[in-house]
Image (cartoon, helix red, strand yellow):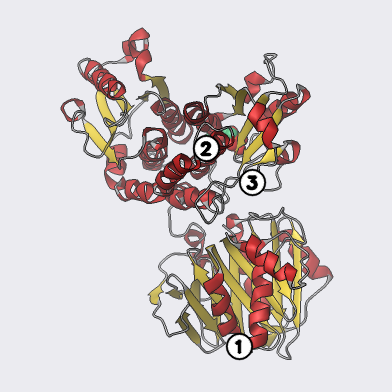
């Protein structure tokens, strides 16, 4: 989620390494923008750093005021906060003695590692997991005297996802990096070499790149690039030539941030699950700082949100009510705020928001707290207003979502809501730890299943392009498929400017079926035939009814479901999954469809007309 840049070059220049790093951070700022920092090592071995909360411009202003000395090695970081708020102190790099470290990812076992260091008398200044890694590498360096060996030793001890870069005063012409699950690529220059979380970091200097594999360490000097494994032995990295231009590189080679973020969804779900179970696989949500006795006394949950976030709340309703046996109301924040809702100290209000700045949702939070309710924010953006005004926050870890139309944040919101539901069920005794553990195993399997849906995207795209002249599309779903239908309709409205409407499939015969005429496209999200089969057979009947009246039926169904074939013009299969988790899969073809159809119409899918990424007015 963060932007990382590393540089080492033979030219001693006051500005060149710093300029290279700052330019790289500018190109990576979309990956995270709540703080930024740099660390430089001068040829005579002096480490200097600068870091500031806020946008990169704040760091540049700081550097103008207090220039750093000449250097030949430099690292830079633009942050998307996960551990510790977006403050100067929590900004990267983190220094330990003569060494500076920057990091992208989440170190799951940082608490236990930190406890060991504190017991040894190490004092910490930040709340971050990164500072723990810096202290560990500094200590390893004291015994190895070699930065590569120190980095390798520490990388082997970390759990979670990480890309780390380090510089040390004793090694002025050197930058060392290590990766596990988080990305790291090498840019190969002449008399200079580069590191970056993606090629956007150095693409204006070189297109010759090395893609590092899992659990690899890279050591760059001005003339050498050495790749080793976590075992310390030489390792192979894939060399390639980047065929993107600089602008495309910021989108990771995707045509739009929207397309990129749709493909980021496996990581968004996996990262939201990270660090929330203990070594025994038990759910641990320490960050939900609401007293357990209060959570046990809750007799109603009200979800307040807008747009896509509200549809995530609707999915959460089915799961939380099933697991916790607590009534869950889902309210559009702008309606909740003004309808004199019944809310009191036994109500838990869950405010769902990607930006954490939606004014309608913020006003609902304030109203709920005035009525004595406890408020839990379920938010993606650290340091935003809604978490600050809530009693507690459960962050989604989707990373920055740049496209106005929400996709990966939606899946991360649903994932976090599942975690909240399981946490409450475990806390209130509705579920045993082993039952929760079984559901968590299924949840952890979802990123791979989402990837399988993405791998099948071509036929969805093909169908979308064939429908470029469509003027209206309907979406039907039942149970957890109903909010998916609503979200699918919203994506098509806001991206392709096509009239679209989502319905509960059971509502069809109560009016909407009058809309069905020859050729009317209708998406139908079909529940698993392996669940409560009455739902499945009812939805298959709905498909028959609309097909008999001329509808063009586009069906989202589970692998192996052949019952739908006689009535479907198109079937887009998704992997099998538990009914309550199915929205994480069923929505993906609808996102791809809307994005592709809008693209085929030549529309700007990242910044659709009339919309803004965060609606900060009521
Ligand atoms: C979703 O694609 C839209 N961009 C919009 O409905 C959005 O979900 C809504 O405005 C809520 O935004 P938030 O999650 O930042 O609060």
Q: Does the residue labelled 3 lie within 8 Å of ligand 1?
A: yes
Q: Label 2: which residue? A: 422
Q: Residue 381 carries which label?
A: 3
On the image, the x and y values in percent for residue 237 come to 40, 77
Q: Foreground: 225 or 141?
A: 141
Q: Which numbered disc, 3 or 1, marks the residue that appears first in the sequence?
A: 1
Mark 2–mark 3 Cα distance, whole angstroms, equals 23 Å
Left or right side of 444 for 149: right
Q: How crowded is mark 3: few (under 14 residues within 10 Å), some or many (20 or more)?
A: many
Asked if residue 558 is positioned above or below residue 111 in the image, the reply reads: above
Which secondary structure, mark 3?
A: loop
Q: Which numbered disc, 2 or 3, marks the residue that appears first in the sequence?
A: 3
Q: Residue 146 carries which label?
A: 1
Q: Can residue 610 be seen by looking at this rendering?
A: no
Q: How crowded is mark 1: few (under 14 residues within 10 Å), some or many (20 or more)?
A: some
| Residue displayed at 69% across by 23% down | 346
Mark 3–mark 1 Cα distance, whole angstroms, equals 38 Å
CB atoms at circles 2 and 3 under 8 Å apart?
no
| Dot in front, 2 or 3 | 2
Ligand 1 quadrant assignment: top right
Mark 2–mark 1 Cα distance, whole angstroms, equals 46 Å
On the image, the x and y values in percent for residue 350 come to 63, 31
CB atoms at circles 2 and 1 under 8 Å apart?
no
On the image, the x and y values in percent for residue 61 come to 78, 64
On the image, the x and y values in percent for residue 463 come to 28, 38
Q: Foreground: 594 or 226?
A: 226
Asked if residue 104 is positioned above or below residue 45 in the image, the reply reads: above
Q: Residue furthest top?
A: 510
Which secondary structure, mark 2?
A: helix
| Residue displayed at 60% across by 73% down | 165
């Amino acid at each position: 989620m963060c932007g990382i840049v590393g540089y080492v070059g033979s030219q001693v220049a006051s500005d060149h390494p710093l300029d290279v790093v700052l330019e790289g951070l500018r190109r990576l700022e979309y990956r995270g923008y709540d703080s930024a920092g740099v660390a430089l090592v001068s040829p005579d071995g002096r480490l200097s750093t600068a870091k500031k909360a806020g946008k990169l411009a704040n760091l540049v202003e700081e550097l103008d005021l207090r220039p750093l000395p000449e250097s030949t090695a430099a690292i830079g970081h633009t942050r998307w906060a996960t551990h510790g708020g977006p403050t100067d102190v929590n900004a990267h790099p983190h220094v330990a003695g003569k060494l500076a470290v920057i990091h992208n990812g989440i170190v799951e076992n940082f608490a236990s590692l930190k406890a060991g260091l504190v017991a040894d008398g190490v004092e910490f200044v930040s709340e971050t997991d990164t500072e723990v890694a810096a202290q560990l590498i500094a200590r390893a360096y004291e015994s190895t005297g070699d930065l590569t060996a120190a980095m390798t030793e520490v990388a082997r001890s970390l759990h979670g996802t990480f890309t780390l870069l380090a510089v040390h005063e004793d090694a002025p012409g050197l930058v060392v990096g290590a990766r596990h699950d988080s990305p790291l690529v090498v840019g190969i220059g002449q008399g200079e070499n580069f590191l970056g979380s993606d090629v956007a970091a150095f693409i204006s200097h070189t297109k010759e790149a090395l893609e590092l594999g899992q659990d690899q360490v890279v050591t760059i000097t001005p003339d050498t690039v050495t790749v080793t494994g976590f075992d310390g032995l030489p390792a192979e990295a894939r060399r390639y030539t980047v065929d993107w231009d600089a602008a495309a590189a910021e989108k990771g080679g995707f045509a739009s941030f929207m397309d990129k973020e749709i493909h980021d969804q496996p990581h968004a779900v996996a990262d939201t699950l990270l660090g929330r179970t203990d070594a025994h696989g038990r759910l641990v949500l320490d960050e939900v700082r609401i007293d357990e006795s209060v959570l046990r006394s809750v007799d109603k949950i009200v979800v307040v949100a807008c747009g896509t976030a509200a549809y995530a709340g609707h999915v959460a309703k089915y799961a939380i009510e099933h697991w916790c046996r607590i009534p869950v109301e889902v309210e559009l924040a702008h309606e909740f705020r003004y309808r004199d809702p019944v809310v009191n100290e036994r109500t838990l209000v869950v405010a769902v928001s990607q930006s954490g700045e939606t004014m309608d949702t913020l006003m609902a939070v304030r109203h709920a707290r005035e009525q004595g309710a406890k408020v839990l924010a379920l938010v993606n953006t650290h340091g935003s207003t809604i978490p600050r005004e809530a009693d507690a926050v459960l962050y989604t870890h989707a990373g920055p979502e740049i496209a106005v139309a929400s996709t990966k944040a939606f899946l991360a919101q649903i994932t976090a809501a599942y975690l909240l539901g399981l946490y409450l069920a475990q806390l209130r005794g509705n579920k045993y730890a082993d039952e929760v553990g079984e559901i968590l195993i299924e949840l952890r399997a979802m990123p791979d299943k989402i990837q399988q849906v993405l791998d099948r995207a071509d036929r969805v795209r093909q169908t979308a392009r064939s429908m470029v002249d469509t003027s209206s599309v309907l979406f039907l779903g039942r149970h957890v498929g109903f909010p998916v239908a609503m979200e699918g309709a919203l994506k098509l409205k806001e991206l392709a400017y096509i009239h679209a409407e989502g319905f509960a499939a059971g509502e069809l015969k109560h009016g909407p079926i009058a809309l069905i005429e020859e050729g009317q496209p209708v998406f139908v999200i079909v529940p698993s035939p392996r669940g409560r089969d009455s739902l499945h057979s009812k939805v298959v009947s709905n498909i028959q009814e609309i097909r008999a009246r001329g509808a063009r039926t586009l069906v989202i169904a589970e692998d192996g479901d052949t019952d739908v074939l006689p009535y479907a013009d198109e079937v887009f299969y998704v992997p099998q999954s538990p009914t309550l988790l199915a929205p994480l899969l069923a929505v993906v073809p609808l996102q791809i469809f809307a994005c592709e159809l809008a693209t085929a119409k030549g529309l700007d899918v990242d910044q659709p007309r009339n919309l803004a990424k965060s609606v900060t007015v009521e």
